[in-house]
Amino acid sequence: MMKISPGVSGFSRILFRCGRFKMDRGENQVSIELQESVEPVPALFKLITSNSVADFDSIIPESLSCQPNGHQRKLSVSISMPSSPTGASSAGSKNVLDVEGNGKGCKDEAPSKAKPKGVRFLSQPMPIGSAFGEAANIRNINQHPNIKKLKDKRFNSFKTWSGKLERQITNLRGGQSESESEEGSAQSSDRALPVDRYFDALEGPELETLRASEEIVLPDDKTWPFLLRYPISSFGICLGVSSQAVMWKALATATSTKFLHISLTVNLILWWISIALVAAVSTIYLTKVVLYFEAVRREYYHPIRVNFFFAPWISLLFLALGLPPSVATTLPVALWYVLMTPFLFLELKIYGQWMSGGQRRLSKVANPTNHLSVVGNFVGALLGASMGLKEGPIFFFAVGLAHYTVLFVTLYQRLPTNETLPKDLHPVFFLFVAAPSVASMAWANIQGSFDYGSRIAYFIALFLYFSLAVRVNFFRGFKFSLAWWAYTFPMTGAAIATMRYSSAVTNVVTQTLSVILSVAATLTVAALLVTTILHAFVLRDLFPNDIAIAISDRKPKPQNKWFNLIRHGSSDHDIETFLKFANSDSKDIEAALKIPTAEATCV
């Protein structure tokens, strides 16, 4: 007799009486007989064949193997439990298992008269193959791209709620700190980057391309979340479309263009499209402000991107100027003060930096996009004067005139401390036309007529317009960028100013010029709209990874250049790296191969 303890609390000790166990190697016969036990229990042993379980280790001694008809088959034993307590009542019978040849045959004897004392809840059998499938899924689930994207913590330093706030909560709870790399990137994102780092780490027309020797704090081997790739320059689209609504309103209402018989319906349609566009772009960018505030802050400290923070407010001013008469004829005066308040705060910050002579002095950060920070003064003065205001519009007109004069001289002269403006940034030269065009109309509204002051500003704008238009090759051979939308509204502003001048000096020349400039502005906006849609939905490269906001706050360690390795032999990887970052479009081959003096002495 052998006593077996199940090892589970609450169960009684069960006594099994083992009958006989016979094994005959010659006949390959195994028989097991279970005599009546003290208590009826379910069958614990179930005979199954090894080929019914995938990947089951069925190695057993050769003495238990069967060889029917010359084919060898190995047997395996599996422990099985009934799936429910009801199975325990029917399982208390005396079973005799005969395994002969192929392992088949099972004889049941009469059930025992003993009844179970209580119901026992026993475990259920595991489905065949489920363990292996689940194990494989567990191993492969971490390799799924969506799961890896969710577990990627390299974007946490740019997240509003998963960045600094999460680290503070973790420190208060006494949790363990993150790895040194994540901690270093988090600390670097807590302080503003100096403007020198942008010029040292970036290159290109809009300082959007990373230099070969620099590194970024975000992963460059994958596509970033959409909000991180959505730049502030997207508001340039709103400037182009909303200014078109103003132009078509002027075409329908100006006395010099009455012969065209333009309907105000076009103005109404464009105005509603502008409303929807401004709302969509603003909603997306506000979501970025909420979720990725660090990315927005880095755009604000970018020497070129900071000027586009004026674009949303200029778009709202254009919407007020292009208001269709069928919607409303007058606007509340308080609206003007609300719209001009952001301009005042932004100008106090940026103009103060220009004048202070620090890292962001005008001679160092001057570029054509600075016109966006100036033209808003004239657009605000134009709207305020059309509402009947005097002092406020004159104040902003004076501020804009002073800073436009300084900016115009700085950009026109291109001081020796500044490099030549890159070719890809040539389209934004049209921003030179924006300020004098809008200033002429603003002064006309302030004075009540298109007098000599307005005409002087208009003629300056007209000359700059034609000086750029005749240089066709000046605007060919570069890559499309969202920043191009920023120069569509200067062309539209020049067309509207020409209509105002044509109303004061009406003749065939001024009327023809009004039509030509209006057609040119409309075709430019239409061409940019088609190009933008093509890049967004067909080529899908409208919003690439925004490298400009991911630069590190530390300069990289100096490394040997590729040409220093030539004497000692260079690998294919070194040559490939050089060819990858060598830009033959902006510089010729000789300039790319030129060795600096300090490094040439070391060779």
Image (cartoon, rainbow, N blue to C red):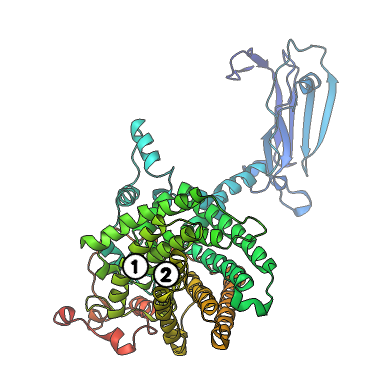
Q: Residue at x 55, y 55 (%)?
A: 145
Q: Is residue 251 visible?
A: yes
How far apart in space, not on screen, are marks 2 and 1 (Cα)?
A: 8 Å
Label 1 sits on residue: 401
Percent coordinates x, y for residue 355 in the rendering: 24, 62
Look at the numbered discs 2 and 1 and tell me whether their residues touch, using CB distance below 8 Å: yes
Position of 418 relative to 324 (above/below): below
Label 2 sits on residue: 439
Percent coordinates x, y for residue 381 in the rendering: 43, 61
Q: Earlier in the sequence, mark 2 or mark 1?
A: 1
Percent coordinates x, y for residue 402 in the rendering: 30, 67
Q: Residue at x 55, y 77 (%)?
A: 503
Q: Name the kind of residue labelled 1 in the image.
A: Leu
Task: Name the disc covering residue 108, or none.
Answer: none
Residue at the limit of the structure toward the right, as seen here? 110
Q: Residue at x 63, y 65 (%)?
A: 270
Q: How many marks?
A: 2
Side (left or right) of 374 relative to 406: right
How packed mark 1 is, by other alpha carbons closer than 10 Å (few <14, some 14-19, many 20 or more), is some
| Label 2 element class | helix
Q: Name the kind of residue labelled 2 in the image.
A: Ala
Percent coordinates x, y for residue 76 in the rendering: 68, 40
Q: Is residue 208 visible?
A: no
